[in-house]
Image: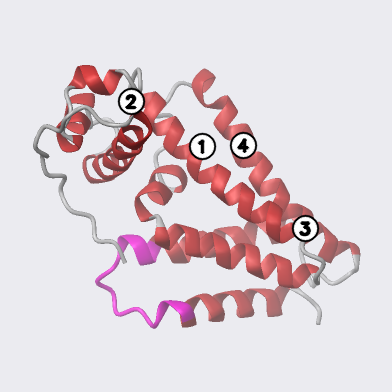
Amino acid sequence: MTVLKKPQRSARKPKGDGHTRRGEILEAAQRIFVAEGYQGSTIRKIADEVGVSSTALYMHFKDKDEILLEISDGAINRLLAINSEISARPIDAVSRVRMMLDAYMEFALSNPNAYQLVFCGNTGMIAEDKVQATQDLGEACFQKFIAVVREISATGRLRMGSVDSAAQALWTACHGLVSLLITKPDFAWAPTGELRAVLLDGLLHGLVVD
């Protein structure tokens, strides 16, 4: 599990490939936004860690908001691709829901900084007019998931609740587990794979009729 450390200033780097440098900026911004908070972060701090001038960084991003939105869109797009691929598999809907939730947790634990920024960050950091496209993308991702839960309900297999409440309960339970694993690494956790399996099997056994 990744342990967050206070960002260290990098030596100034020579001009490099634009795509590579853009990726370095996004990685550095993730670490700094999480370690110091979005409001406490500055373009200069990000530029210093990447090892470029603030002027060079502005050639890639016009401000902090644009950086955070690109981090958010990148994370959600990866989850959307995962949900789209799993939802199209010709297998039982319950198996697909389980796969989606496990893939979601795997993504969170493999990308803890991005996950915290996208799914654990304070709302209202960016003006509403700037975030609408990102919110729409997140809704599309969740709709891929809820559509498969709806398939389960359509066959009469939900023990309780509605499609909305079942889907939201499943998602929030998985979010809670990975959020704690990321932010409380010193707790004496059981093996991560076992925790994920117990959570998913317990949730689905309680919600779905075999």
Mark seen at residue 88: 3
* Residue 105 visible to the viewer: yes
Residue 176, above or below 81? below
Q: Is residue 170 left or right of residue 121?
A: right
Which residue sits furthest right?
155
Q: Secondary structure at mark 1?
A: helix
Q: Secondary structure at mark 3?
A: loop
The residue singled out by tag 2 in the image is: 64
Q: Is residue 124 left or right of residue 155?
A: left
The residue singled out by tag 1 in the image is: 73
Q: In the rendered structure, are the residues bearing label 3 and label 4 in contact, judged by CB atoms less than 8 Å apart?
A: no
* Pointer 3 or 2: first along the chain: 2
The residue singled out by tag 4 in the image is: 137
Q: Quadrant of residue 158?
A: bottom right
Q: Nearer the viewer, mark 3 or mark 2?
A: 3
**Which amino acid, mark 2?**
Lys
* Residue 123 visible to the viewer: no
> Range of the magenta residues?
180-193
- Does 181 appear in magenta? yes
Q: Where does residue 120 sit, x and y in percent of width and height?
A: 42, 48
The residue shown at (40%, 25%) is 66
Q: Callout 1 environment at 10 Å: few (<14), some (14 to 19), or many (20+)?
A: some
**Which amino acid, mark 3?**
Ala
Q: Nearer the viewer, residue 5 or 24?
A: 24
Q: Callout 4 environment at 10 Å: few (<14), some (14 to 19), or many (20+)?
A: some
Q: Secondary structure at mark 2?
A: helix
Cα distance between the residues tagged 4 and 1: 7 Å
Q: In the rendered structure, are the residues bearing label 4 and label 2 in contact, judged by CB atoms less than 8 Å apart?
A: no
Cα distance between the residues tagged 1 and 3: 22 Å
Q: In the rendered structure, are the residues bearing label 3 and label 2 in contact, judged by CB atoms less than 8 Å apart?
A: no
Q: Is residue 190 left or right of residue 88?
A: left
Q: Callout 3 environment at 10 Å: few (<14), some (14 to 19), or many (20+)?
A: few
